[in-house]
Image (cartoon, rainbow, N blue to C red):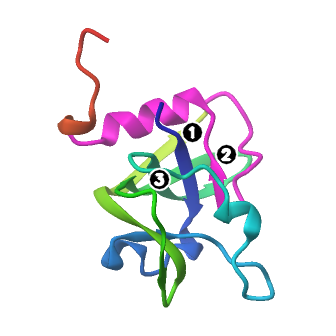
């Protein structure tokens, strides 16, 4: 099963051009150990977002992770990503407060948000209609 990970827009500078997603660093500029051992794996879906906890979620880009193996970059510890969609999709009124909205990186569990993200993916990543 694919997992969905949201990345705060201001923490994603350079990700699209370099085709990567990088793990956040602690205030001491060290990789955050919790995030290094997080479950981001090959074929997981990552998305860059901006949100307001009480109102809306703006999806800015969606990518598919290409490897389980991180590499070191000038941006930190990173995984390669195929950024398959870019734009502005605004989600409002989807049934809950976005409690993790301000986190630099979090796993998205809201099924309505996941469904919206899946609908934005190119056809090759879509499930067959009989599902």
Q: Residue at x 60, y 47 (%)?
A: 56
- Residue 103 locus on image (x, y percent): 71, 61
Side of 36 where 14 appears, left or right: left
- Residue underneath mark 2: 55
Q: Which mark is residue 46?
A: 3
Residue 103 shows in the view: no
| Local secondary structure at mark 3 | strand
Q: Cα distance, mark 2 to mark 1? A: 6 Å
Q: Residue at x 74, y 46 (%)?
A: 54
Write down the region rendered in magenta: 94-122
- Residue 111 locus on image (x, y percent): 56, 27
Q: Nearer the viewer, residue 7 or 3?
A: 3
Q: Cα distance, mark 1 to mark 3? A: 20 Å
- Residue 60 locus on image (x, y percent): 42, 59
Q: Classify 10 Å Cα crowding around label 1: few (below 14), some (14-19), many (20 and above).
A: few
| Local secondary structure at mark 1 | strand
| Local secondary structure at mark 2 | loop
Q: Residue at x 31, y 60 (%)?
A: 83
Image position of 107 with respect to 75: above or below: above
- Residue underneath mark 1: 92
Return the disc, 2 or 1, that comes first in the chain's sequence.
2
């Amino acid at each position: 099963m694919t997992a969905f990970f949201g990345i705060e827009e201001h923490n994603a500078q350079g990700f699209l051009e370099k085709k990567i997603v990088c793990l956040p660093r602690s205030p001491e500029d060290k990789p955050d150990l919790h995030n290094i051992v997080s479950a981001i794996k090959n074929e997981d879906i990552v998305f860059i977002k901006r949100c307001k906890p009480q109102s809306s979620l703006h999806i800015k880009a969606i990518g598919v992770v290409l490897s389980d193996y991180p590499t070191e970059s000038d941006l930190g510890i990173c995984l390669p990503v195929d950024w398959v969609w870019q734009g502005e999709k605004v989600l409002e009124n989807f049934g809950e407060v976005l409690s993790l909205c301000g986190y630099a990186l979090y796993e998205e569990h809201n099924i309505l948000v996941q469904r919206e993200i899946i609908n934005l993916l190119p056809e090759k990543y879509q499930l067959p209609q009989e599902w």
